[in-house]
Image (cartoon, rainbow, N blue to C red):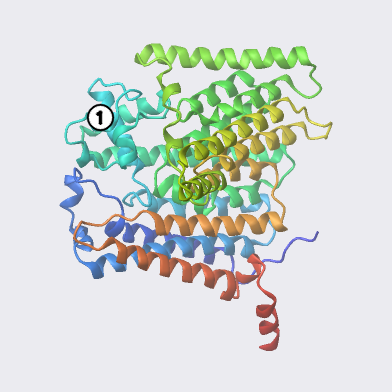
Amino acid sequence: MSAPKPAPGGPEVALRQGLVGSILMTVGSMGVGWLAQGSVLIRTWPFIVARTTLPAVIVCTVLVCVGALLLLRAWLRLNQRVGAWTPEHRPLLKKALWYWVTPLVFALPLFSRDMYAYFGQGRLMLEGLDPYKSGISSLSNYFSLGPDTLWTEAPTPYGPLWLWIEFGAVLISGGAPEPALFIFRLAGVLGVVLLYIYIPRLAVMCGLNAERTIWLVVLNPVLLINFVASGHNDSLMIGLVVAGVYYAATRRAVRGVILITASIAVKPITILALPFAGLLWAGKGARWPRRILCWGATAGISLGLLAVVGVSNGLGFGWLGALQTPGTVWIWFAPVGLLAHTVGFVVQLFGSSGDPVTDVILTVGKVLSVLVVLWLVFRWPSGEKNFTRELLRNTAWAFAAVVVLAPVIQPWYMVWLLVFFGVTGISDGWQMKLVYYLSAFFVLIALTDQLNVFGWIPIDIVRAVAIVVGVVLVLHMIYADRKTHHLFHAPRFWKRLSRSER
């Protein structure tokens, strides 16, 4: 297939569009970003006036929506304007990352208040409470810390490394949320930097274009929004696991296992990568005795490190009991969660309790995900020349099984899959179009989900504005924007209309 021709105007135009988008999001965050009652310092800043009246909040909402979708469009147009990615484009990619990330570092938390939960959990650590047994509600005046109600009663599902980061952030900040939030943001940026470093290396090992993979994965607006603007610790988690997988694939397995263990110690979901790291350690053509030996060594190193950490912080393996915390909710676009609760609701309409049926369906989903992961672990590569690529693709499918069969799918879960599928190959056909649609969908979900306003501002009106502006701009990008509509498989009537106007 011949390389696409670059669009006129040069890629710098797309870089500037993305920069404007990030700046608009940052400015808009001053009106609708998450602000805790305890954020005393921020409440003294002049920008607080943007949160005090409905017109000002609506303006900020529009700025956030326009900024996020301008960033999405800039990402699409950057690929179009480059045409064919080459190593000479690496400085351009670095510049784009710098342009698009820097403004978001200074935004108020957008689309999520998880960073306030991190702050509350750090307070628990500072006061000598066990975050694996106590929720944030154990703190006095906990409601002023700004966490989601899910975290006020629930124990933390995070690993010991992240607890140390939370503790350190609270300690360094002197108990003030603003500096602590900035530290969490920097941890998110560190994760993005790790991805920028190691994703192209894995892509090359898998026989892919490194620069195209950086654009596809690292500069994806869903990643930037969730890892930087929202500040999710998934950024550091994924950055560490990708670095670990790279070293495991380059015969530096011990270093790789240590990094993967560090990732597990942020969020334990990346324990899925351990058995595949063991197979990478075993190497192509390894027989069962060597595979089992490498699996044992991988598990031994990882469990040993986690045990040492558990002893040092006095919390042991307490995080194992808290792993179900995220699974206590469900979301409408998670297939298993939607099916389970819909069937349960129908059963309830006929006079029976729907809870047992819902629980059975959710349990079946969990069991299926475990079976799929085990099958992928024991499914040895078929003899394909690129052993690393096939094993990493199995890793991608393992994460996909866990995500798709879970009762809840968060927007940043898409980034987990994008990373592993991205480094093993996403073609320019229907697979790329699926990425475009999913990126647009999850950006839109972020815009219309969590916005924070003062109590006297009618949140329903603000959310309605976000939904209308977001949906209109996404539909415009998919169906009417002459530069981007063809990327989404425009309907035939639009193609005929375009020809008739020539």
Q: From what the image shows, is residue 160 above or below residue 332?
A: above
Q: From what the image shows, is residue 458 above or below residue 303?
A: below
User: Which residue is pictured at 51% across the width and 60% down the height?
Assistant: 72
- In terms of secondary structure, where does tag 1 sit? helix
User: Which residue is pictured at 45% across the width and 22% down the height?
Assistant: 320
Measuring from the top left, give residue 127's x and y in whole percent.
22, 23
Decide which of 152, 110 is in the foreground and name it.
152
User: Which residue is pictured at 64% across the width and 45% down the height?
Assistant: 422
Decide which of 272, 208 is in the foreground and name it.
272
Decide which of 12, 499 is in the foreground and name it.
499
Q: Is residue 453 left or right of residue 73?
A: left
Measuring from the top left, give residue 426's x and y in whole percent.
69, 49
Q: Is residue 387 left or right of residue 225?
A: right
Instruction: Determine the residue located farthest toward the bottom in the rendered image.
Output: 501
Q: Residues within 10 Å of mark 1 (few under 14, many from 20)?
A: many
Instruction: State which quadrant residue 53 falls in.
Output: bottom left
Instruction: State which quadrant residue 49 falls in.
Output: bottom left
Q: Is residue 27 left or right of residue 93?
A: left
User: Which residue is pictured at 75% across the width and 22% down the height?
Assistant: 283
Q: Which residue matches tag 1?
A: 123
> The C terminus is located in which quarter?
bottom right
Measuring from the top left, give residue 247's x and y in whole percent.
62, 27
Q: Amino acid at mark 1?
A: Arg
Instruction: State which quadrant residue 381 falls in.
Output: top right
Q: From what the image shows, is residue 393 above or below residue 33?
A: above
Measuring from the top left, give residue 427's x and y in whole percent.
72, 52
Number of disc labels? 1
Q: From what the image shows, is residue 430 above or below residue 405?
A: below
> The N terminus is located in which quarter?
bottom right
